[in-house]
Amino acid sequence: MERRQHRRVSAQVKSLLRANSHEVEGKATDLSMGGARIESSLDIEPGKPIVVKLLMPGDDVPIVIEQAQVQWSVDRTFGVRFLDVRQQDRDELEALIDECIALDEGKEA
């Protein structure tokens, strides 16, 4: 039985991650309104807070999730849960997810 509340899409979104005052690059490879799977060199333990910035191609302003929490970590991949997302960033994230779904549906056609 699927436990997820939000639709999840495959993505390749460049991101910046900040934890413990370090900011490193990463890549969000799985994305939903509630969280993301991220590949990165950042070494972080589950339960730790993290800031996630999603950098959209062609957009100068990133989607910023100031309050996220690491849920799990395996090798260089970890899952984050978005705890609090500003409405403007929530709208941008929803548009990004819709765009990923449209691209996926276009590939299947």
Image (spheres, helix red, strand yellow):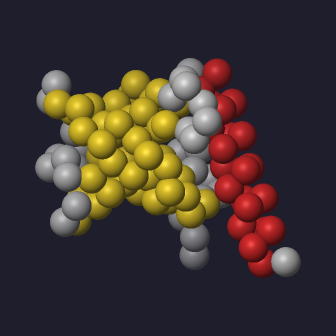
Q: Position of residue 25 (x, y in %)?
A: 30, 42
State left or right for residue 75 relative to residue 13. Answer: left
Give the residue at x 66% y 49%. Answer: 97
Residue at the extreme front: 58
Looking at the image, residue 61 lies above or below residue 16: above
Residue at the (54%, 23%) spot, across then down? 61
Q: Is residue 96 left or right of residue 18?
A: right
Q: Nearer the viewer, residue 108 or 8?
A: 108
Quadrant housing residue 50:
top left
Outermost residue toward the right in this view: 109
**How many marks can you see?**
0
Residue 9, by quadrant, is bottom right
- In the figure, 40 relative to 105: above or below? above
Which part of the image, by quadrant, shows the N terminus?
Answer: bottom right
At 79% from the left edge and 68% from the top edge, which residue is drawn? 105
Residue 60 makes an appearance in the image: yes
Q: The C terminus appears in which quarter of the rendering?
A: bottom right
Q: Is residue 54 left or right of residue 1?
A: left
Report if residue 71 is visible in the image.
no
Residue 10 image position (x, y, % from top left): 56, 63
Tell me residue 94's x, y (percent): 68, 40
Give residue 32's position: percent from left, percent from top: 57, 50
Give the answer, above or below, for where 24 lies relative to 13. above
The residue at the point 60 percent across, 59 percent down is 8
Please name whichever residue, 5 or 45, is drawn nearer the observer in this view of the structure. 45
Q: In this rendering, would 32 be left or right of 72? A: right
Viewer-closest of 72 and 107: 107
Q: Is residue 96 above or below residue 2?
A: above
